[in-house]
Amino acid sequence: MLDLTGKSALVTGGSRGIGRAIVLRLASQGADVAFSYRGNAAAAEQTRAAVEKLGRRALAVQADVARPEDATRLIEAVTAVFGRIDILVNNAGITSDHLIAFTGIGDWARVIDTNLSGAMYVTRAALGEMSRAGRGRIVNIASVAGQAGNASQANYSAAKAGLIGLTQSVAREVAQDGITCNAVAPGLVPTDLTDELPPAARDAIVGQVALGRPGTADEVAATVVFLASDEAAYITGQVLAVDGGMAMM
Ligand code: NDP
């Protein structure tokens, strides 16, 4: 069993979905967990209470990762309360799906700003403390769409492909400071994000999955916790697919 006792973690977008599952897995393995959310205070409160029920310290911070000043405030809030950030999971993400011909500047910018720039802002703000301490684990939640592309998701796929490039570059830069940086690329995981998919589109995606079913948020969380643990000390700059054999890169 992976032991995260004494570690302090931060998950962006931890109020719902995959982020929430990551928060709860980290807490179950012994970590104190802070998380950010954009606007859903009720969901954030439920997640915060669930962490405390597991006997760990919890901190919920409203912060829009697409705003650099919010990213800085988020890291300051977490270090003020926990004193350290051993594990950072850049999970916050959105979609705004359109065929490329119908993708407006706003649809493009919103998705890039949140899914890619947001991870950069939070990572940049967290690295000072991690580097000084000479340890750290960064896990970025990418997507199979960032590896293989997806029709109607040019903005999302570009953001996630960029996130993979960010992961590899950061991994090379910070290895000397004892910090690893990896990405997890989920396939289809039923959450609020995928709720809008028409049933036919969902069936078509599942048809490409070797294991023949969607994944669960907890299956993604289990992989994140592994990459965040001491057991993954010799893994960096990697993209680990949790997609039931959908992409097989
Ligand atoms: P959900 O829509 O269920 O949850 C999104 C979370 O991100 C919420 O906590 C939300 O906060 C938060 N969030 C959204 N925008 C911002 C922002 N600007 N600043 C801070 N927090 C924000 O999504 P999922 O759980 O499905 O997705 C989580 C991650 O996994 C995303 O990066 C997504 O791209 C990725 N992913 C998901 C897949 C899937 O099939 N579900 C597949 C592959 C990758 P609030 O509650 O306040 O709105």
Image (cartoon, rainbow, N blue to C red):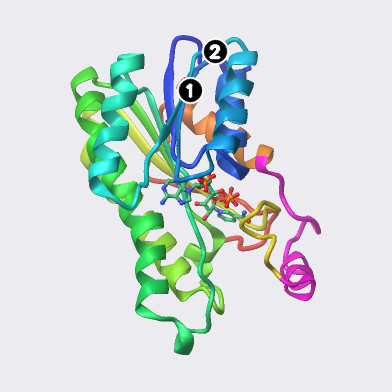
Residues in magenta, as a range: 198-217
Q: Amino acid at mark 2?
A: Arg
* Secondary structure state at the residue bearing disc 1: strand
* Residue at x 38% of width, y 56% of height: 114
Res. 223 in view: no
Residue 116 in which image quadrant: bottom left
Quarter of the C terminus within the rendering: bottom right
Quadrant in the picture for the N terminus: top right
- Residue 210 lies in the magenta stretch: yes
Q: Who is closer to the viewer here, 23 or 232? A: 23
Residue at x-position 29% and y-position 21%: 79
Please tell me whether residue 142 is drawn above or below residue 31 in the rendered image.
Answer: below
Where does the image place residue 85, in percent across and percent down from the top left?
Answer: 34, 23
Depth check, front residue: 32 or 224: 32
Q: Cβ of disc 1 within 8 Å of ligand 1?
A: no
- Which amino acid, mark 1? Val
Residue 185 sits above or below residue 206 on the image: above
**Could you tell whether 237 is left or right of 176 in the image?**
right
Query: Mark 1 sits on what residue?
Result: 33
Q: Work out whether mark 1 precedes mark 2 in sequence or the reverse, and give the earlier one.
A: 1
Q: Which residue is mark 2?
A: 56
Q: Which residue does the image show at 76% across and 64% down from the upper left?
A: 206
